[in-house]
Image (tube, rainbow, N blue to C red):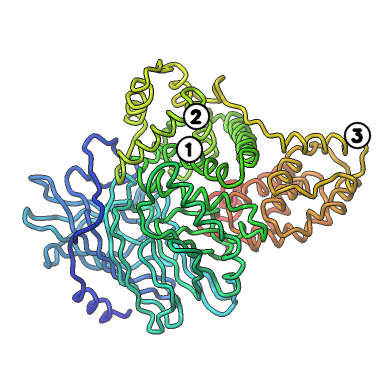
Amino acid sequence: MKRYFLILISLLFIFGCKDHKEKAVMEKDISKDIHSYAQPAEAVVQHLSLNLDVDFDSKIIHGIAVYQIDKSEGADSIIFDTRDLDIKRVLVGGKEVEFTLKAPGPHMGSALKIPVTSSADKVSIHYVTSPQAGALQWLNPQQTAGKTDPFLFTQSQAILARTWIPIQDSPGIRFTYEAKVKVPEGLMALMSAENPTEINEDGLYSFKMEQPIPSYLMALAVGNLQFAPLGDRAGVYAEPELIEKAAWEFAEVEDMIRIAEELYGPYRWGRYDMIVLPPSFPFGGMENPRLTFATPTIIAEDRSLTSLIAHELAHSWSGNLVTNATWNDFWLNEGFTVYFEYRIMEALNGKDYSEMLAALSLQDLKKAVASFIDEGKDKDTRLMLDLSGRDPDEGVSSIAYDKGYFFLRYLENLVGREKWDAFLKQYFEAHAFQVMDTKRFLAYLKAGLFEKNGIEYPEKEIQEWIFESGLPESLPTPDSDRFDKVDQALNNWLKGTPATEIDTTEWSTHEWLHFLRNLPDQMNIEQMNELDKAFGFTATNNAEILDAWFIHTIRHQYAPAYAKMDSFLVNTGRRKFLTPLYTEMAKTEKGKVMAEEIYLKARPNYHYVSVHTIDKVLKWQERNPE
């Protein structure tokens, strides 16, 4: 342990809150977060000074977290969330104190209770992470594009920040932060903060985040990285082997920022940079402020999948700026963000393009609702969730994203786009750097949109959207002329037109997805061969198309695609792609054997988030008890 380094830089830190540009607003009436042990009404973090020493050999981080805190009168302790952390020492006001680390609970880890005096305003926690920390993925060189250097990245959402920092791990608690990070020489460190653009040969990096953020937006990445500017306010980081492709793929991001600001107000985070992570990253993107994490699977070399970047950018307003108070209110982050994403893409590429995105969302939504109902989980199709006693990651489904989007589209249709846009812009401005729960949002909606404009409030319909299961009768239906043409082409093929005679020259990824999703459930090998020969599905490197094609590969036992599917599953960790493929394989005995053979090879490459899901799909722990 580089103990002396940590002590030295901790002494050099100037702790405490500075003149931060933005201030968080702590509100006493926000719902209690059932996924955090913290008691913010008693004592709450305001600012974090973090010292980290990243040890790739041991796959651990040595850390000192120093918190500026605010206490209510009479408070005698402050509580932090931890999970699998080794707490070495705790100091309050510079003096070492005894602390209590309670027994871990399911999903939530352990409460760290620290006594505080009436005059104490700083708490220092010395700790070490576990090699199995849920947020951290340590990659060896062979798991990277360059094959020469190791890589580390974090994924804190929903409640995994507590596995690499002792923290009040609730979306309802915001704080500013600064950090010093030591990494091996020759590697670059980046955080959700102000970032370097070149590698420091000594491996020492400093960071500052002056806008208050919740803990799930704490992020760190370490690797052999290069930076490419994309404009005055945007840029991209990637391994050297990918930087040129990434810069070309994301060239439209400055236009996206401009469009977003024209729609709903100024961008409040300074820069908007992105990092393309290795393929084991479990999500399409993660909206860490000032540094969006992105999967390499969106680099399609035709800019057809960059709506994901529009989505993560939109989070700079919906989620990062106005944040769901608890994970039961997750739709307030994601439903708004999908709506905002589609508005950006409409302005960038036209209404016919955004309607394709909306139509695919409706397909995903209907499939998700049917699946939840089949599993007896009707309540999980509600926008307002009840995740009591459950991992909040279970709330990450198409319901929050797509049902949330269609609810907002329903509201837009009801009052008109002009009034809706004015309301939404005011919503972001009025609640900037604050948190929001469903009850308070509905009160604000009623007063700020309906009553303000003299429009009758549709109480019954809104209650149905938010609090009832399934899909409401007022569900909007996208109108996509481009998908109508795909439907006609598919019908022609089913009636005998050779696949080679279908004109697909103008099709985007979205048209191909619609085509693949609507192929019949029953096809013979001759039909599969014809489609593959005509359109090159197995040979494509477009991950979205591959994933949709592999569903049919599994369903129709199309052996010519097995090797490519095996490679795809071993080398891609994005949960969105993994879950449907493993689920489809698990439907038959032959498929289960194939799934387990692939998963045995692939599992070490996946992040904890993906492993946690696929283990359940395959009942892995039952078959492979540790």
Question: Where residue 425 appears, x then y in whole percent?
Answer: 38, 38
- Looking at marks 1 and 2 on the same chain, the residue that comes earlier in the sequence is marked by 1
Examine the rendered structure and indicate whether residue 238 appears above or below residue 581. Answer: below
Q: Quadrant of the N terminus?
A: bottom left
The answer to which image quadrant residue 489 occupies is top right
> What amino acid does circle 2 point to?
Phe
Find out whether the residues at labels 1 and 2 contact each other: C-beta distance under 8 Å.
Answer: yes
Q: Secondary structure at mark 1?
A: helix
Find out whether the residues at labels 1 and 3 contact each other: C-beta distance under 8 Å.
Answer: no
Q: CA distance from mark 1 to mark 2?
A: 8 Å
The answer to which image quadrant residue 122 occupies is bottom left
- Looking at marks 2 and 3 on the same chain, the residue that comes earlier in the sequence is marked by 2
Q: CA distance from mark 1 to mark 3?
A: 39 Å
Find out whether the residues at labels 2 and 3 contact each other: C-beta distance under 8 Å.
Answer: no
Graded by Cα atoms within 10 Å as few (under 14), some (14 to 19) or many (20 or more), the crowding at tag 3 reads few
Residue indicated by mark 1: 335
